[in-house]
Amino acid sequence: MNRQKKLVILVLRYVSIFLNLFKDSGYHKILSPFDGNIVPSDMIAESNISRDVFGNSLGIQPVENKVLSPCACIVERISPVGNAMLLKVGNAHLIINIGLEFEKYKKEFFKLNVVEGQRISKGQKLMSFDIEKIYKVDTNFVCTITVKQNRTSRHVSFINAKHVSFDTILCTLNVL
């Protein structure tokens, strides 16, 4: 009986180790939702972004008119105009803004491919936008991604690069 107990304990330990190999580590690689040139947050005219009021931010001047999901997440909110989204990943939020002069934009500038409450996968198309129409009303057009975490989370360090594409890892988050 003693041998059987030891064998059961040993088997349970190996099963536990095996299952932990597939457990979510809590670390998520956040890919760029845009293809474009990086604009450091302190160079962005919008003071809440430049001072990282809502979280750590990074600006990107897009060269393509589409936005892809930076990770597997849930679409929590979409702005009334359609130029901004709040994405939930674990205990963190990602705020994606297509331009910062939303009062100048019209709903027809944006074509949404997702709805609020929808679970989305990494790389899934979130929306497209009419870059030419936006530049006509917003000469300082820049897109941003902001990482908003709870107060106990650490500072987020973004990639140090001049250009990013859709498969570029911007940062890694611990979202447990």
Image (spheres, rainbow, N blue to C red):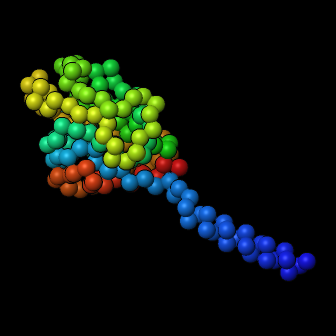
Residue 55, percent across and down? 36, 39
Residue 33: x %, y % from top left: 28, 44
The x, y position of residue 98, in whole percent, is 24, 32
Q: At x 26% / y 28%, what residue is drawn?
A: 111
Residue 149 in view: no
Q: Residue at x 56, y 65 (%)?
A: 21
Q: Quadrant of the N terminus?
A: bottom right
Q: Quadrant of residue 100?
A: top left
Residue closest to the far bottom: 3
Q: Is residue 42 left or right of residue 121?
A: left
Q: Would you say residue 108 is visible in this rendering?
A: yes
Residue at point 21%, 51% (across, down): 165
From the viewer's perspective, is residue 84 above or below residue 6?
above
Against 153, residue 115 (above or below) is above
Numbered circles on residues, count: 0
What residue is at 59 percent from the left and 63 percent from the top? 20
Instruction: Please state if 90 lies on the left or on the right of 113 as rendered.
Output: right
- Residue 48 spot, x, y in % from top left: 29, 32
Relative horizontal placement of residue 129, taking residue 7 as reference (left or right)? left
Q: Quadrant of residue 15?
A: bottom right
Find the residue positioned furthest to the right.
1
In the image, 175 versus 67, the foreground residue is: 67
Q: Is residue 103 left or right of residue 172?
A: left
